[in-house]
Amino acid sequence: MLKYATLIYLISMPALAYGTFTCKELDRISLAAEGSMTPAYPGRKFTFSWDINGFSGDGVFYHKDYEVTKISEMEFSAIAKNSDRHDLFRFEKSILMHTAIVNYRSEPSIQSQVFSCMEVN
């Protein structure tokens, strides 16, 4: 009986597809009370890993802890915040969308980026 209960428990738990992804920036904009800015050199690249501990890598994953919501096997949304920034992510169909409210200056700014990503095997 215990085997069946354990099996049902494991099957009912959401499965997360973890992996490492390389991403290329498609678009970026920063908005603030002073105006808006787009990058002089768009197309930056970065790599991130998604595992049981959260996210790590270079690029836009600046926090230690994320509140992750699974959308499907390879899709998620994630939120993280601290006193300097509040970040929102959505990863769908190999597109990573990232928006941050950043409080580094006297007035906050909003930064938005869109990346095309591929899983690294």
Image (cartoon, helix red, strand yellow):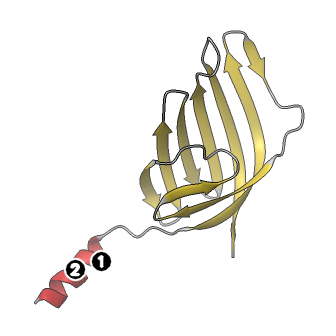
In the image, residue 40 sits, relative to residue 19, either above or below, namely above
Which of the pair 40/73 is nearer the observer? Answer: 40
In the rendered image, the quadrant that contains the N terminus is bottom left
Q: What residue is drawn where x is 62% and y is 11%?
A: 106
SS for callout 2: helix
Q: Amino acid at mark 2?
A: Ile
Q: Amino acid at mark 1?
A: Ile
Q: What residue is drawn where x is 72% and y is 9%?
A: 34
Q: Which disc number belongs to residue 103?
A: none
Dots 1, 2 in contact, CB < 8 A: yes
Which of the pair 29/82 is nearer the observer? Answer: 82
The quarter of the picture where residue 49 lies is bottom right
Q: Which disc number belongs to residue 11?
A: 1
Residue lying farthest left? 1
Q: What residue is drawn where x is 71% and y is 25%?
A: 30
Q: Residues within 10 Å of mark 1 (few under 14, many from 20)?
A: few
Residue 36 horizontal/vertical position (percent): 75, 18
Residue 91 horizontal/vertical position (percent): 57, 52
Residue lying farthest right? 41
Residue 37 horizontal/vertical position (percent): 78, 22
Q: What residue is drawn where x is 53% and y is 68%?
A: 18
Residue assigned mark 2: 8
